Image (cartoon, coloured by chain):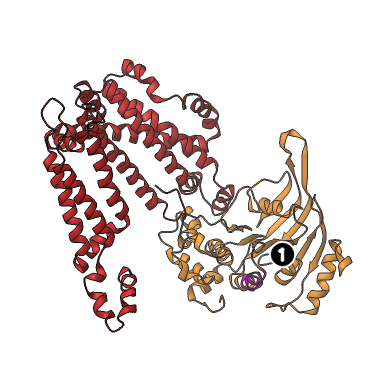
Chain colours: A red, B orange
Amino acid sequence: MTTTTESLPRQAVSPPLPAAQRTGKPAALWLGGLVAATTWLALGVLVLKWPNKEVGFSDWAYTDEFGYFGLGVAALLALLAVGGTFTGRVVRLLRPAGQWLVALPLLLALWEVLTAKLGVLPSPFFAPPQSLIEVYGEDWSRLGISTAYSLRLLAHGFASGAVVGFVVGVWIGWSRIAGYWIHPVLRFLGPVPASALLPLAFFFAPSSYAAAVFLIALASFFPVAVLTWSGVAAVNKSYYDVARTLGASERFLVLRVAIPAALPQVFVGLFMALGAAFTVLVTAEMMGVKAGLGWYLQWSQGWAAYSNMYAALIVMAILCSGLITLLFKVRDHALSWQKGTVKW
Amino acid sequence: MVSATHTPDTQVAAAASTNGAHIDIRQVSHWFERKGGQGVLQVLDDISLTVAPGEFVALLGPSGCGKSTLLRLVAGLEPATAGHITQDGQPITRPDPSRIVVFQDPTLYPWRTVWDNVALGLQARGLLKQQRHRVDDALALVGLDEFADAFPHQLSGGMAQRVALARALVNDPQLLVLDEPLGKLDSLTRLSMQSELVALWQRRQFSALLVTHDVEEALFLAQRVIVFGQRPAAIRAEIKVDLPYPRHRGDPLLAQLRHEALRHLGLDGSW
C-alpha cells in the first residue's frame, strides 16, 4: 500500500515509468527507518566521542560497547530502510513502532548525558545505560535465578489464589446459604492489603516461602472471588429460564450457563489479581524470602550496587507486563465471542 | 424458505409427534407478593382453558395483564397459587423439555455459536452425542444452516428469533409456548415469520399456545383466540377462527373477527 502512495508524485512527473518505479528500490524506501537510523547513529557517536566525566574512581565500563551498540542498531535500521523487497516483512512489523524507534535513542542519549557525560545525576545513585550492560553481562546467572524464583513463587501463589477465588465466587454467587455466610466475611476482610498481614504470615507459616505463597494467594483471591461472584449474580435470569425449560439440571446451569456468562467478569478479576500479586510478591521477597527479584533489589541496594538495582527493575517491568499481556491473550482467546472489550 | 426444505428426516420426526400435548388449565388463579410486604397482587383470576392435541390457541390481551404469567405456569417455571394445570392428565410441577418456551427476546447465549445454541436442549439431556443430526435438521428447518458457525451478535433480530425457534423445535416439543415471540421484530420480518410459524406448526403438529397483544397476529395464526381483560386477567371471550391454512390476511372473516376482538377489548370506538 505504501508503494503506491510514495510512487504517486513520481507518476505525476513522468507518467511512462510507473511499473518500474513500483518494483524498484526507491519506491520501497522506508523513510521513518532512515530517520530512526540517523538518531541511533547520533547516539552512538555521542557516546563514543564525548568523554565520560571523571568521578574519582575508574571509568564506566562498556562505554565503547554501548556506543557500538548504537552504531549497530543504526546500521541495521539503515539496511532495513533501503532493503526494498528483501526486508519488506520486517519493515512491515517495525513500521508502526517507527516513532518509538526515534524516541528511544533520544531518551537513551538524555540518560547518558545526564549521568555519564555531565554527571548532573550523581553516581552511584544514578547509573548510565552502559552499566546495565555490565550487570546483564556479568551478573546474569544470579539475576536469572532470582527471576526464576520470583516466577515460581508467583505461579504457586497466584494459581492457588485464583482457583480458590473462582470456586468461592461461583459458590457464593450460586448458593444462597454460602452467599449469606461468606459474603460479609469477604467484604470485611477482603479489602485489607495482604502485605499488612506479612508479619502475621511469617510468624505462623512453617517457612517464609509458604508464608509468601499464602499472602500472594490471599491477594489474588479477593478480586477473583468478588468479580466472579458479581459476574454469576448478574447473569440474565432468562438464560436460566431457557435452560430449565430445555431440561437442564442444576449442574448444567452452573457449568454451562452461569460460568460462561460470568467469564468476562472473571477475567477482570484475574487482571486485578495479577497486579495485586506482583505487589505482594516483591514486598514478601524484600521482607523475608531469601530469593527472587525483590530480594535482588534489596541486596543490590544494600551493597550500593545501584546499576544492579536498575537492571532488576527493568527485568521486573518486562516480567509483569509480559504476564499481563499473556493473560490478555488468553482472555481474547476465551472470549473471542465478545466484541469491543477492554484493551491492554 | 421453510416449505423448500422437505428432508426425509423432518418428515419422520413429524410423523413421530403427530400427537401434540393436551393441556388442561382448571380454575387457575395466581397472586404475586408485592415488594416490601405490601400485600399481594392478583394477576390471574379463575382461568379455565383447554388446548386440544395439535391445536393452535392464542391468548390476546392488553400488555401487563398477566398472559405471560399464565405461560410461565404452563411451562412449569412457577407453581400456580390456586388451581390445576395438567398435561395429558399429569400435573405440571416443573419445566419439562416436552413443553418448550420461546420468549420475546431470543435469549441466545452470546458465547455459543448458532449451532451450539440450537444444540442446548439435546446437550442438557445428554442426547447430543448420538443425535447431532437433529441440530442440523432444525437449523435447515428455519433456513439458517449456513449460519451455524456465526455468533448471536452477528445476527439480525429476525434471524436470532429463528434460531430461538430452532432451539425449541430441535427437542420435538409436544407443546410450543410462544411468549410474544415476534413482538420485537420489525413489521415486515414479523409478517414473514408469522407465515413460517404456521408452516412449522402444520409440519410438526405440536400444540401451540401463543401470547400476543397483536389482534391480527392472533387471528392470522390461531384456531382459537382467547381474549383477556385487564389485570387480574380473566377470560372475556373466546373467538373461533374457522379458516383453513394458509390464510389470507385480506379475508373478510378475519376483518369481521378483528372487530369482534377489539370490541371485547373495549377498543372498537376507533373502528
The answer to whether residue A259 is seen in the rendering is no
- In this rendered view, identify the residue nearer to me: A327 or B14: A327
The image shows residue A309 at horizontal and vertical percentages of 23, 30
Question: Closest to the observer: B214 or A48?
Answer: A48
Q: Which residue is mark 1?
A: B57
Q: Is residue B191 magenta?
A: yes
Q: Residue furthest bottom?
A: A16
Question: Residue at 25% of width from left, 38% of height from top?
Answer: A111
The single residue placed furthest to the top in the displayed view is A203
Q: Of helix, strand and loop, which one carries label 1? A: strand
- From the viewer's perspective, tell me whether residue A288 is left or right of residue B186: left
Q: Quadrant of the N terminus of chain A?
A: bottom left
Asked if residue A149 lies in the magenta stretch, the reply is no
The answer to whether residue A270 is above or below residue B20 is above
- In the depicted structure, whether residue A24 falls above or below residue A338: below
Give the side of residue B264 with respect to residue A76, left or right.
Answer: right
**In percent of the image, x 49 and y 59: which residue is there?**
B117
- Residue A25: tell me if it is visible: yes
Residue A116 or residue B79, whichever sits in front: A116
Residue nearest the viewer, comparing B214 with A277 = A277
Q: Which residues are magenta?
A: B187-197
Question: Residue B15 location in percent, x, y?
Answer: 55, 71
Q: Residue furthest right?
A: B269
Q: In the shown orientation, is residue A294 left or right of residue B57?
A: left
The spot of residue B113 in percent (x, y) is 46, 60
Q: Amino acid at mark 1?
A: Val
Q: Chain of mark 1?
A: B
Please name the residue shown 24% across and 42% down the image. A109
Q: Main secondary structure of the magenta part?
A: helix
